[in-house]
Image (spheres, rainbow, N blue to C red):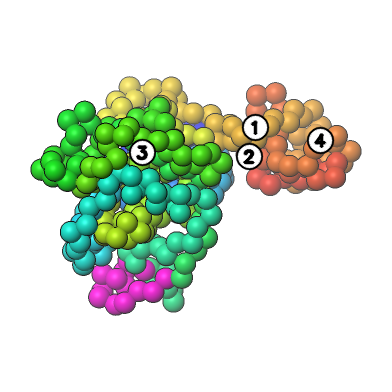
Amino acid sequence: MHGWIILDKPLGLGSTQGVSAVKRALRDGKYGKFKVGHGGTLDPLATGVLPIAIGEATKLAGRMLDSDKVYDFTIRFGVETDTLDLEGKEIATSDVRPTRAQIEAVLPRFTGPIEQVPPAYSALKVDGERAYDLARAGEEVKLASRSVVIHALQFLPELASGRGTAREASGGGAGEAGADAPPLHHAAEAARSPSPSKLGEDLLEITLRAHVSKGTYIRSLARDIARALGSVGHVTMLRRVKAGPFTLESAISLDKLDEAAKARTLEQILLPLRAGLDDIPALSLTPDQAGLLRQGQVLAGIAKEDGQYFACLEETPIALVEALSGHIRVVRGFNL
């Protein structure tokens, strides 16, 4: 049991609870004890892709933390909360409701490299204390801005009923996430125009998809977009649809996890260790080379371009390695 189980994390569940659920499944299925960790925190109010690493895959969990992510999120205009989501208390209001044309004009400012101030209610540390602990204690939290990259922002289609417009404010929830929604703004592409009939509507809320670099806070992005539109806002829906190479297509519910544990078929939903390195080319080894790498030694005279490789002896993962000037060094070794 060395690999990945991808959870579709439900609302209200913390990331550590997701790890606990997988540990419980391993225990219930009598698979024995394995290290278990997650590849990127999701807030309890967020749902979606939560990679859970098992066994030797935990050595790659750090790579998931550094990987790009894709989120769908809904911004509701008119109220800003202290947590920047539904959980917080109201701290600012505005009567301004932007039109789609106004939003379209603002989004390019939030595409590409940007500076962002993280939310006060975040896990970042201030003088050794978690920011959210200080904020909950009523202390003023000041966090420095950080550089992040928004690779792409796109509108997701509104529901056919028009729910989400200011003139139908009682509608509530967010539109369905459209995987094939046309990109509106991209760092390397020109904007595409929305339907003219939508341009003049005052919007109570919008749903966007964002492809972002590590360290990006979607709640801060929503706050800043709303303020740039002369309004305020907060996140009412946040769903991670991709984390590194993992998407919702490979994600399972907690019910499916429980069923697989009881049926002792967890191995059928376990993705191989290699799945976390699908962007890394493979390097085939001889038995002698594999033995040297397992001992932590450097391989010399290997004609490979500089970069990282997934080194294997036939089907057995040996190490994540780095090639530099014809030498191969171990970055992460696997005890398999």
Q: What element carries label 3?
A: strand
Q: Looking at the rendering, which quadrant does residue 91 occupy?
A: bottom left
- Residues in magenta? 131-143
Residue under label 4? 304
Foreground disc of the pair 4, 1: 4
Q: Does the magenta stretch include residue 141?
A: yes
Q: Mark 4 or mark 1, which has the lower sequence index?
A: 4
Q: Position of residue 66 (x, y in %)?
A: 54, 49
Q: Which of marks 3 and 4 is nearer the N terminus?
A: 3
Distance from the alpha carbon under mark 2 to that under mark 3: 42 Å
Residue 319 appears at what percent x and percent y? 68, 39
Going 79% across and 28% down the picture, which residue do you hit?
286
Residue 324 lies left or right of residue 196; in this view the side is right
Residue shown at 20%/41% (left/top)?
164
Q: How many numbered marks does the figure carry? A: 4
Q: Name the residue under label 3.
A: 155
User: Is the residue marked by circle 3 packed among few (<14), some (14-19), or many (20+) residues within 10 Å?
Assistant: many
First in sequence: mark 4 vs mark 2: 4
Q: Does the magenta stretch include residue 196?
A: no
Q: In this view, does 9 lie to the left or right of 296?
A: left
Q: Can residue 8 be seen in this view?
A: no
Question: Residue type at mark 1?
Answer: Pro
Badge 2 element: loop
Q: In this view, does 182 lie to the left or right of 287?
A: left
The quadrant the C terminus occupies is top right
Residue toward you, 178 or 20? 178
Disc 1 target residue: 317
Mark found first going from the N terminus, 2 or 1: 1
Identified by mark 2, the residue type is Phe
Q: Is residue 259 visible?
A: yes
How far apart are the two marked residues, 3 and 4, measured between alpha carbons?
A: 42 Å
